[in-house]
Image (cartoon, rainbow, N blue to C red):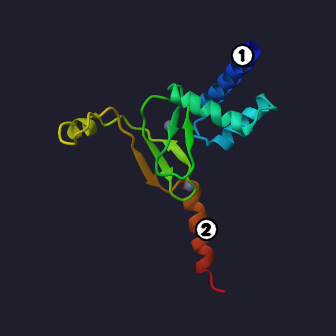
Amino acid sequence: MRKTQTLRLTRQRSIILQELQNLKTHPNADEIYEIVRKDIPRISLGTVYRNLEILSDIGQIQKLELGGTVKRFDGNTENHYHIRCVHCNKIVDASMDLIKDLEKNLNGNSGFTILDHRLEFLGICRDCEESLSNLEEEIAKPM
Ligand SMILES: [Zn+2]
Ligand SMILES: [Zn+2]
């Protein structure tokens, strides 16, 4: 690979990283692509995918592979918990401290050396709750 090419890749990667760190929405690759395209109009979706994989391999971002069907990315690499809306799959950070005892309780009887843990809460976000209750009212209305 020529030097100019390497430099371009590095620049693309750092823009992807910056955009992701600015977001609190845990976007998927397609959403990140749409955002990064504003900075780098000629970037391809494949390049965004590849860079996201590299960034998560080298530990600069977190890949969220929990219950949701679409892979999402998080610019915050500190372990923290998430809440996912079961209706629209929106993911937000759960505002709570890590439960250290969770790992302590498991060590010794699982046959594993526990390194870390992930925790995802499931719920219905306010937006979905509102649209669902509107829908219920709609259904309940006499014809
Ligand atoms: Zn929702
Ligand atoms: Zn998060």
Q: 75 left or right of 81?
A: right
Calculate the distance from the C-alpha at mark 1 to the C-alpha at mark 2.
52 Å
Q: Residues within 10 Å of mark 1 (few under 14, many from 20)?
A: few
Quarter the N terminus occupies: top right
Q: Is residue 64 above or below residue 136?
A: above
Mark number for residue 134? 2
Q: Residues within 10 Å of mark 2 (few under 14, many from 20)?
A: few
Q: Residue at x 52, y 37 (%)?
A: 63
Q: Is residue 114 above or below residue 13?
A: below
Q: Nearer the viewer, residue 67 or 84?
A: 67
Q: Which residue is mark 1?
A: 7
Disc 1 vs disc 2: Cβ atoms closer than 8 Å?
no
- What residue occupies the far top of the structure in this picture? 3
Q: Residue at x 54, y 60 (%)?
A: 129
Q: Residue at x 58, y 29 (%)?
A: 54
- What residue occupies the far front of the structure in this picture? 1
Which quadrant of the view contains residue 73? top right
Label count reads 2
Q: Is residue 129 above or below residue 19?
A: below
Q: Is residue 123 above or below residue 108?
A: below
- What residue occupies the far right of the structure in this picture? 41
Sequence-wise, which precedes: disc 1 or disc 2?
1
- What residue occupies the far left of the structure in this picture? 108
Q: Position of residue 57 (x, y in %)?
A: 52, 29
Q: Position of residue 7 (x, y in %)?
A: 72, 16
**Which amino acid, mark 1?**
Leu
Q: 136 left or right of 12?
A: left
Q: 122 left or right of 88?
A: left
